[in-house]
Image (spheres, rainbow, N blue to C red):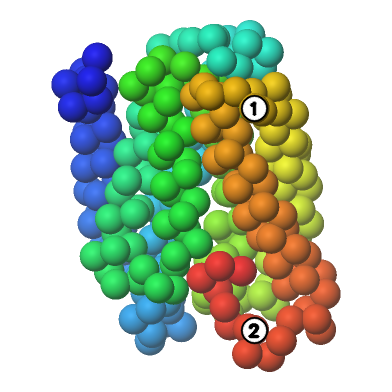
Amino acid sequence: MPPLLHPALPLLLGATLTFRALRRALSRLPLPEHVRADPLRTWRWHNLLVSFAHSIVSGVWAVLCLWQTPEMLVEIETAWSLSGYLLACFSAGYFIHDTVDIVISRQTRASWEYLVHHVMALGAFFAGIFWNSFVGGGVLTLLVEVSNIFLTIRMMMKINNAQHLLLYRVNKYVNLVMYFLFRLAPQAYLTHFFLRYLGQRTLGTFLLGNLLMLDIMILIYFSRLLRSDFCPGLVPSQHKDKFLTE
């Protein structure tokens, strides 16, 4: 069925509006004093609160999907479940919301890396949503949201200048472990799987291209994470406050 007539469109619209409403609700919460004093930090704080909520729900949901339908770990292209399909719609709604939020808040230049990531992620999710292929792959990619829980905590503490707290020091090690387990490991597994489509003219080839670009981005983010948290002396002074991406 053509995407313009697809029955998944109400699900995508509903998910997008849900995240928009969540952002409005979370923006009413009191802000830390250091965040409140800076409009950019205020916007980023609200943006990260929504991201944090999405990571908790989708990360746990992805783990449950794989536990309920373990064949998704092997039959990445053909395995399907209603729960996995709804998860893809839910997360696609989040990425649509976040893209719109970045654009209307005039943060496009500062957050262009997020926009590139969102476009690639949406391309992957739409394969499952509109063509019912690679739903298992979409669920596997969402394991990264487990890692994002701790990554978001880290970024919110940096925005609030709370790196001196014990929680930050503990979280940076937990975050590193989760980065390996739920970001690098699934990404390597998926890349190995999709290499079989190299040289073909299929949807799998398009997704392989997406995946390879995400691989590059993830490795760049990983190098930034190591440099910022474990080798701060290597961070140029002009980038010490680059909390939007590091």
Q: What element carries label 1?
A: loop
Q: Name the residue nearer the viewer: 44 or 9.
A: 9
Q: In which quarter of the image is the N terminus?
A: top left
Residue 194 in percent (x, y) is at 66, 26
Instruction: Tell me: residue 120, above or below residue 139.
Output: below
Residue 111 visible in image: yes
Q: In this view, does 201 lie to the left or right of 105?
A: right
Q: Residue at x 66, y 75 (%)?
A: 163
Q: Residue 144 carries which label?
A: none
Q: In which quarter of the image is residue 128?
A: top left
Instruction: Tell me: residue 72, above or below residue 207.
Output: above
Q: Residue 199 carries which label?
A: 1
Q: Name the residue nearer the viewer: 115 or 239.
A: 115
Q: Residue at x 44, y 73 (%)?
A: 110
Residue 68 visible in image: no
Disc 2 to disc 1, how far (Cα)? 43 Å
Q: In which quarter of the image is residue 108?
A: bottom left
Instruction: Tell me: residue 43, above or below residue 47.
Output: below
The numbered mark, 2 or 1, whose residue comes first in the sequence reads 1
What's under tag 1, amino acid-wise?
A: Gly
Q: Is mark 2 on a helix, strand or loop?
A: loop
Q: Residue 240 carries which label?
A: 2
Q: Which residue is drawn at 76% across and 53% down?
A: 176
Q: In which quarter of the image is residue 157?
A: bottom right
Q: How many labels does the image show?
A: 2
Instruction: Tell me: residue 188, above or below residue 152.
Output: above
